[in-house]
Amino acid sequence: MRRLSVTRHPEKGPVAPPVLAVALLVTLAVGVPLAAIQVAGAIRPDPASSAPAGVPTDDPTDDPTAVPTPASTAGTPASPVLRALDSDNPISDPAWFVQAYEAGFRLYILSATEFGSCTPLARTQAQLAMAIDAGLAVAAYTRDPRCWREGIAATGSFRIRLQFFALDIETGGPPLTRDMITGVQSSGVRPVVYTGARMWEDIMGRETTEYSDVALWDAVPVEPDSPAVPGLPDDPADLLSPAPISFGGWNAPGNLRVGVQQHFERVFNGVNIDVNTFATSFLY
């Protein structure tokens, strides 16, 4: 997500992975498959649930041409993790999404409103269609989590194709509320919390764990205004890199993060993106 900033606390020194996070690593080291680790939020909400006012209930399956069919992956063994990209930048070329798929990405997460506002982006549905046509799963977010209603409405009939909608809890933004979570759920979309250990402590407080029933998309700290880096990272997709830090009730045994944003502002074929790893088992 663009311009992710983290408030530094020099007096606290570097944050080391706590005992619970180390326990996760030890568990994997002795042979427990990553796919067997329980993650929060794995149950898909009923897409037929009543959507709140302003959120469309169209089903693109009513019109076979509304949502292109993803490329078939039948017969291919599922990996426990997959690469995902998130971006709030305009992309108008369908070939870009094909190239992203060929580069190993399997999930595209887009911003559905103007940066920092609740104004829906008119390009949202076109970009979702191109991504799905290229074989990518899709999800959405808004930089201001209070704009969840407008963000989901911007996806139109593609709402039922969303893997999740991320509530972005980061420095400079508002705190998370249960109403935001239930609002997303009432639209038939699965909520995810996007935040990091430092940001959560700054905004929600160190001891706040009441939202750990919602799946975590973990954010790795970066310096504000970090320059964009050309090309994709060389490291493989890895849900445990960097080592998970326990906070907010997440990254504890039985409640590992479902995604982690590992590389911020990479330039892929002319478009700035962030590079993530997600647990394959979390996707539908």
Image: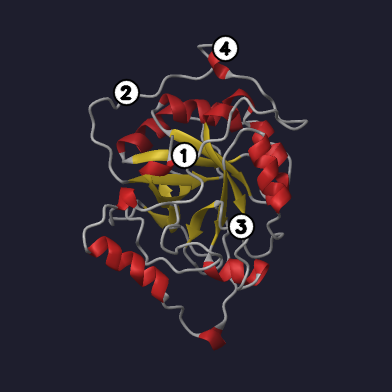
Q: Which mark is residue 6?
A: none
Q: Which residue is mark 1?
A: 108
Camera-near label (3 vs 2) is 3
SS for tag 1? Answer: strand
Which of these two is toward me, 271 or 248?
248
> How far apart are the two marked residues, 1 and 2, measured between alpha carbons?
17 Å
Q: Which residue is mark 2?
A: 72
The location of residue 214, given as percent across then percent down, is: 56, 51
Q: Residue at x 61, y 57 (%)?
A: 211
* Picture layout, residue 217 above or below residue 44: below
Marks 4 and 3, the one that precedes in the sequence: 4
Q: Which mark is residue 62?
A: 4
Q: Which residue is mark 3?
A: 211
Q: Residue at x 46, y 30 (%)?
A: 131
SS for tag 3? Answer: loop
Quarter location, residue 257 = bottom left
Marks 1 and 4, the one that precedes in the sequence: 4
